[in-house]
Amino acid sequence: MVYAESNPNNGTNGMEGSQIVEKKKLVVLGSGWAGTSFLKNIDSSLYNVQVVSPRNYFAFTPLLPSVTCGTVEPRSIIEPIRNIVKKKKGEIRFSEAECIKIDAANNKVHCRSNHDINVEGKEEFLLDYDYLFIALGAQANTFNTPGVMEHCHFLKEIEDARRIRRSVIDCFERASLPNLSEDEKRVILHFVVVGGGPTGVEFAAELHDFICEDLVKLYPSLHKLVKITVIQSGDHILNMFDSRISSFAEQKFQRDGVEVKTGYRVVNVSDKYITMKSKANQETSSLPYGMIVWSTGIGTRPVVMDFMKQIGQTDRRVLATNEWLRVEGCDNVYALGDCATINQRKIMEDISDIFKVADKDNSGTLTVQEIQNIIDDIRVRYPQVEVYLKRKHLRNVMDLLQGSLESAQGKTKELHIEEFKAAFEHVDSQMKSLPATAQVAAQQGVYLARCFNCMHDCEVEPEGPLRMKGSGRHRFRPFEYKHFGQFAPLGGEQTAAELPGDWISIGHSTQWLWYSVYASKQVSWRTRVLVMFDWTKRFTFGRDSSRL
Ligand code: FAD
């Protein structure tokens, strides 16, 4: 089989003969975790691949908090996309531009370059595709809180981290000016972090280390005036982690003098004050601040929102896909990473279909063995169910199923079905979308690339595993997420980690595990060496406090 470039005029490459197969056009939107892992794994000799992203590099986001305080340098955690794609067999084209509209009806994406090309109209262009991969990530979510866009820093991109680093030093230099009162200095040196999730907590910890290990030596008179406050709307910080980790983090912050205000929702930010409302008594209070970092979760990008409107997914926060990561309602559009989620409701509908067809012999009752088979079947076909059952707050769901299994004996079939439905409705109500993490995004990129790499073989031999519902057969196994655990660096060379198998590890040794995992996960040897060099430099000379 020979693959050839497609000819836009006649749809063939102009050569006679059935051996020539036109290469399909793949357009990938985004150069983040999902997009890059797709690019690294796709066999680009089989397809015409075109990437569109407003940034021509991949950023290793887990180390962004370290960039905010100069623990690592920004250029150490980015890798040019062109470096990544030049290692591929076939050509991958890259355009530094933004996708402004997805036109799924006509298989086109509208793009705009941010470069000043100096020729009117040339900054916008159209790309057509056979398959589209939406890996656009997400943007910071302000929950429409007034003043946040104007007065707060975010921590999503490299530029954000650089701005925060400048701003921290700026606060210390301003507070060192001779004509300020002590109270004025206190306000300037009040650093507020909104959001007690992993990013907010890690930033607060990094900032505390930066101040205590480096800045205190350079600005000794200011040390006592510095304050860090973390505002969290929930009852605990790091509440997506095991409770042992969140209480360890809270105690550590208390010892370090980092104030944690839980149960408060920020309602307004002005140029001088941050105003919040207590969830307990609805009272509002205002705090003067020097700098705020807003880290309260992620929201939908406008281009994704517009696409969701086009395809009737208006009631959702992110694009809904099936378990094969195909956008619901679009045959040739896939979505991965933070901008997408697998539609669990669909899975639940399929599961309830299993119950309907379970009584094959039409006896009116289901044996215990039949019920057990149903459970096993569901687990094999829907690995996500298994993944969610592993999470600590869902451990009881399996017990519930087993319980209904035992109580099902001797009852009528209808009762069994109702009981199982009830159990799975419970799973459904507890089932959350996959977490918006680099781990999920990267695994989805690898999964889709592998599916597309063997697409040709599957076309020759289309009989794959039977899908549960409908007439179609699916060529690939559904996407299965493997959770490898997660870290929460807490400063002072201590890290907490939730490891596979529900292992919890906290302390200095976990910090060394963190160093080794993050060094090994770097996208290239170049960034790996740079990051390790930065860590060594910081241990030896401390962090650089110049305001560049
Ligand atoms: P992204 O990586 O955000 O990539 C989106 C891409 O789309 C970017 O290249 C962007 O430039 C591009 N893009 C945006 N708009 C357009 C447009 N209009 N047209 C074309 N391209 C566009 N996860 C973990 O698992 N572990 C961690 O320790 C961790 N730490 C984190 C720390 C921080 C500070 C942050 C912000 C995130 C962290 N995450 C972590 C989460 C992780 O970064 C995200 O889940 C991951 O980046 C999602 O990958 P993605 O490819 O969907 O999106």
Image (spheres, helix red, strand yellow):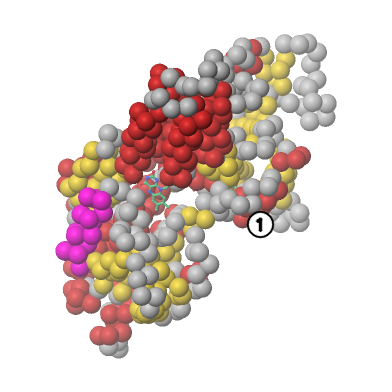
The answer to whether one can see residue 46 in this image is yes
Q: Please count the marks in the image.
A: 1
Q: In this rendering, is residue 341 above or below 547? A: above
Label 1: how many Cα within 10 Å (few below 14, some 14–19, many 20+): few
In the image, what residue occupies the spot 36% across and 41% down? 394
Q: Quadrant of the N terminus?
A: top right
Residue 200 higher or lower than 146, as above or below: above
Give percent across and percent down for residue 464. 57, 16
Visible residue check, residue 479: no
Residue at coordinates 72% horizontally, 11% vertically from top-left? 19
Rendered location of residue 97, percent (x, y): 62, 49
Is 170 in the magenta?
no
Can you tell which quarter of the image residue 411 is in? top left
**Label 1 SS:** loop
Front residue of 111 and 412 = 412
Q: Quadrant of the C terminus?
A: bottom left
Q: Residue 409: percent from the left, percent from the top?
A: 39, 25
The dominant secondary structure in magenta is helix
Observer-nearest of 113 and 242 = 242
The residue pinned by badge 1 equals 116
Residue 337, x across and y down, in percent: 50, 42
7 displayed left or right of 386: right
**The disc labelled 1 sits on which kind of residue?**
Asp
Image point (31%, 66%), residue name: 262
Residue in the picture at 31% in, 84% down:
184
Q: Nearer the viewer, residue 404 or 9?
A: 404
Q: Report the span colored magenta.
A: 243-257
Residue at the right extreme of this rendering: 10
Q: Seen in the image, is 474 located left or right of residue 215?
A: right
